[in-house]
Image (cartoon, rainbow, N blue to C red):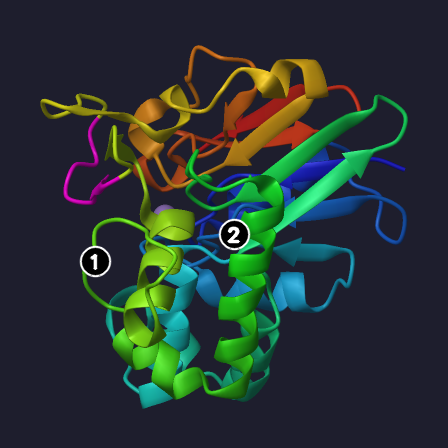
Amino acid sequence: MSTYVIGDIHGCFDQFVDLLNKINYKKNEDKIILVGDLVNRGPDSLSVLNYCMADSNIITVLGNHDLYLLYLLSIDKARGSLKEVVEADNKKQIFKWLLKMPLMMEIDDELSGNSFLISHAGIPEIWSPKKTKELASEVTSLLQKNPLKVLQSMWGDNPNKWHDELIDDERYRIIINYLTRMRFVDKNCALDLRNNTVTAAAGYKPWFKYCSKTHEKKKQYYVFGHWAALKGQTDDPHFIGLDTGCVWKGKLSALRLNDLERISVDF
Ligand SMILES: [Mn+2]
């Protein structure tokens, strides 16, 4: 049995199928974890969703575009490349399926002793894996209990940094922003959510440049998507970026957790 993590698909269904063929994905045996952003921008978001929903060995952590789709479904508004999904006969099933998905996962590979922290954008260094899991679950519970409240008030860039006393909208908005939209942060872990390039503004660095080196001893790996401009390059083998820009005519990439092998297909 192999476990694979796959980068941002963004509706590129043909490349997703190509990649599953290339890794020789065995249904009912292998496991697939997607880093989120299954949908939007690309040509066939609905087929990606239908394929994944039909296979219980495929799961995802939620990305910002998946949350956007949940929002559109919650207000029944068809927009852009998500029109077909919002108008689909099985839109209720899609809503329910996505709502079940976590914002962060930790996977231990027993054979290698490696552990993998998986989220769409990354994990800020101010949160331990345990704390991240707790905060992510807090948002997931709230999303399931009162989806409209979360989906309609999660928008915005403020507050721009975490503190433990945050409550209500501000609390889950910043948790969602760290886990699904983060790229650059400053030394106080304040987010710069406007910059999607690879060039930091003064005082900012990529989030993974702040994380301590203890992960090397612990064989801990951070696996994320979201930042297509990085083209998978972090210059640190413990931070594995899997958004290789398929929808921008780049590549769709997979990581096999058992041996850290990367496999890609071209757009
Ligand atoms: Mn994203």
What residue is drawn where x is 27% and y is 77%?
153
Q: Amino acid at mark 2?
A: Phe
Q: Please tell me whether residue 249 is drawn above or below residue 167 in the rendered image.
A: above
The dot on residue 159 is 1
Q: Where's the N terminus, which quadrant?
A: top right
Occupied quadrant, residue 167 = bottom left
Q: Nearer the observer, disc 1 or disc 2?
A: 1
What residue is drawn where x is 49% and y is 77%?
143
Mark closest to the chain's N terminus, 1 or 2? 2
Q: CA distance from mark 1 to mark 2?
A: 36 Å
Q: Residue furthest top?
A: 235
> Does any portion of residue 186 appear in the rendered image?
yes
Crowding at dot 1, Cα within 10 Å, few <14 / some 14-19 / many 20+, comes out as some
- Residue 251, percent across and down? 45, 29
Mark 2 highlights which residue?
Answer: 13
The secondary element bearing badge 2 is classed as helix
- Residue 124, percent across and down? 41, 38
Residue span colored magenta: 190-197
Q: Where's the C terminus, which quadrant?
A: top left
Residue sitting nearer the eye, 200 or 215 = 215
Crowding at dot 2, Cα within 10 Å, few <14 / some 14-19 / many 20+, comes out as many
Most prominent secondary structure in the magenta stretch? loop
The secondary element bearing badge 1 is classed as loop
- Residue 174, percent across and down? 32, 58
Q: Please tell me whether residue 35 is drawn above or below residue 140 in the rendered image.
A: above
The dot on residue 127 is none
Q: Is residue 198 left or right of residue 22?
A: left
- Examine the structure image and report whether residue 133 is included in the region drawn in magenta: no
Q: Amino acid at mark 1?
A: Pro
Q: Please tell me whether residue 236 is drawn above or below residue 224 in the rendered image.
A: above
